[in-house]
Amino acid sequence: MRARISLSLAALAALCACEQTSQDKAPFVPSYEGIETRLLDGDLVNFLVAMRGARGSEDVETYADCAAAQYALIRGYGFARHLRTNVSEEGGLWRGDAVYTISAALPRGLKTIDAEVVASACAENGIPMV
């Protein structure tokens, strides 16, 4: 009986710790600091993005995807293909240096972006674009 009570108390303590941790999480309130666009060569485009409040590199990469999607649409293209993104963080400022190709037809590769779909999702989520 005593072993069962100890186990139950340990389980209860673990649950309380989990509940407390989830309540202590800060809400996601990003501050998008800007996008710089550089046309490298024809269909090759570089986006430099900066933001504060990112939860990690994935948030910065999403910001760059949004920039690439809108840029493709502005240029009259329907697709982009992600080539690479370098992310850094210093003093709470996250920076992304991303390169994409843009095209009218769906490009080959695993990291392709349907510009209309991604731009729509970005607008719904309040992520600024080019």
Image (cartoon, grey):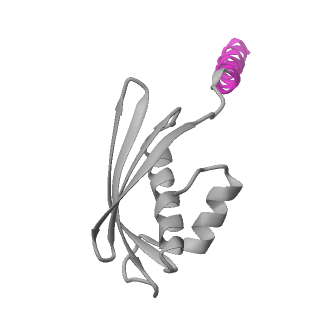
Viewed as shown, does residue 102 lie left or right of 19?
A: left
Q: Give the x, y percent position of residue 29.
A: 63, 33
Viewed as shown, does residue 111 lie left or right of 97?
A: right
The image shows residue 99, relative to residue 81, as above or below, that is above
Any part of residue 114 in sight: no
- Furthest toward the left, the residue is 41
Q: Give the x, y percent position of residue 18.
A: 65, 25
Residue 22, magenta (yes or no): yes
Residue 112 position by quadrant: bottom left
Q: Give the x, y percent position of residue 121.
A: 65, 61
Residue 83, magenta (yes or no): no
Q: Residue at x 50, y 53 (%)?
A: 62
Q: Residue at x 48, y 38 (%)?
A: 51
The image shows residue 90, relative to residue 87, as above or below, that is above
Viewed as shown, does residue 77 lie left or right of 101?
A: right
The image shows residue 112, relative to residue 51, as above or below, that is below
- Furthest toward the bottom, the residue is 105
Quadrant where the N terminus sits is top right
Q: Residue at x 51, y 67 (%)?
A: 69
Camera-side residue of 41 and 122: 41
Q: Give the x, y percent position of residue 14.
A: 64, 21
Magenta segment, prevailing SS (helix, strand or loop) = helix
Any part of residue 1 in sight: yes
Viewed as shown, does residue 71 lie left or right of 26?
A: left
Magenta stretch in the rendered image: 1-23
Camera-side residue of 100 and 10: 100
The image shows residue 14, relative to residue 57, as above or below, that is above
Q: How many marks?
A: 0
Q: Residue at x 36, y 67 (%)?
A: 100
Residue 4 position by quadrant: top right
